[in-house]
Image: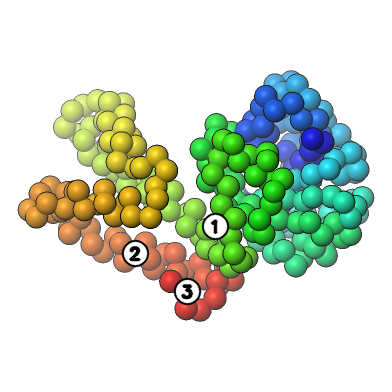
């Protein structure tokens, strides 16, 4: 497939690395110049081209720009009606993308995360995108969403990664205070949490894991009760995204 990437920053690099070995003909824009050079050297089939050529020479165009840059750059590029466009940009609603990428109309918004480079990264998308499934579906769970609001909620929930990691680090730090070995403490906490997370959680798997940790008077149940406020803080923080993400009233 002929693929183009506009914007060669952190997320574009991860998405490109996630395509390694698939044999696509890929054009990347020259910015970030250093990253574009590294990727072209690292992956056969990747070449650097001006933005116009990235669009003109591709069947599928990935938009990996900052949104404020995109609104300036995209209207001048040679989009065609037969292009498939996949935007990964935050703060870039579908209606505005349709306006700046016209006459291209086959446009989807996806939410990749940097671990897509290795695979196993959840990939919510709206509307459903068969080409995204073809390119990434073998190594990542692609999750089509019923509405743009549902996709925005997925974006909101992706923000739990930092606070959860922060708590895990606090626990590892506490442990290292007694063992004197910060590396082993971090390895232990990471392995323990990994072991508890189901590989492919179906509805109910996480609740079942939690139930297994709920022995009355046990250490897990005791710490959970002591931290009850943290659960409310999480809900409040996620609710704080409603305006920014355009989430409807009601919902959760
Ligand atoms: N990073 C993530 O984890 C992540 C996850 C999901 C979605 N996103 C979204 O993906 C988009 C990119 O994020 P990022 O983290 O990859 O940002 P980034 O590392 O700053 O990448 C943006 C890229 O756009 C390039 N650029 C600037 N002006 C350009 C132009 N006129 N033509 C072509 N390229 C141009 C920049 O090059 P210079 O460095 O030369 O300016 C840079 O390489 C954002 O909208 C973000 O919301 C990011």
Residue 34 appearing in the image: no
Task: Classify mark 3 as within 8 Å of ligand 1 or not, answering yes or no.
Answer: no
Identify the secondary structure beneath mark 1: helix
The mark nearer the N terminus, 2 or 1, is 1
Residue 251, disc: 3
Residue 219, disc: none
> What is the CA distance from the residue labelled 2 to the residue labelled 1?
18 Å
Mark 2 vs mark 1: in front: 1
| Label tally | 3
> What scheme was used to colour the molecule?
rainbow
Q: Nearer the viewer, residue 94 or 77?
A: 94
Residue at horizontal 42 percent and vertical 43 percent from the top: 200
For mark 1, what is the residue? 155
Quadrant of image for the C terminus: bottom left
Where 99 falls versus 48 (above or below)?
Answer: below
Identify the secondary structure beneath mark 3: loop
Residue 112 percent across, percent down from the top left: 59, 46
Residue 227 percent across, percent down from the top left: 22, 58
Q: Nearer the viewer, residue 86 or 37?
A: 86
């Amino acid at each position: 497939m002929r693929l183009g990437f506009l914007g060669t920053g952190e997320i574009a690099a991860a998405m490109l690395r996630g395509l390694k070995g698939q044999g696509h003909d890929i054009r990347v824009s020259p910015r970030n110049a250093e990253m574009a050079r590294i990727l072209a050297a690292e992956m056969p089939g990747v070449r650097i081209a001006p933005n116009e050529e990235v669009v003109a020479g591709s069947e599928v165009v990935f938009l990996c720009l900052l949104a404020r840059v995109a609104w300036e750059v995209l209207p001048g590029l040679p989009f065609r009606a037969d292009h498939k466009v996949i935007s990964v940009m935050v703060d870039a609603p579908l209606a505005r993308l349709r306006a700046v990428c016209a006459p291209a109309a086959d446009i989807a918004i996806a939410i990749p995360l940097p671990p897509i480079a290795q695979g196993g990264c959840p990939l919510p998308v709206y509307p459903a995108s068969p080409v995204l499934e073809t390119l990434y579906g073998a190594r990542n769970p692609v999750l089509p969403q019923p509405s743009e609001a549902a996709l925005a909620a997925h974006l909101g929930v992706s923000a739990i990664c930092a606070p959860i990691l922060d708590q895990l680090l606090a626990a590892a730090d506490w442990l290292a205070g007694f063992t004197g070995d910060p590396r082993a403490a971090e390895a232990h906490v990471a392995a323990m949490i990994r072991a508890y997370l189901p590989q492919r959680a179906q509805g109910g798997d996480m609740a079942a894991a939690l139930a297994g940790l709920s022995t009355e008077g046990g250490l897990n149940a005791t710490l959970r009760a002591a931290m009850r406020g943290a659960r409310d803080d999480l809900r409040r923080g996620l609710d704080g995204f409603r305006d920014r993400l355009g989430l409807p009233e009601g919902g959760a």
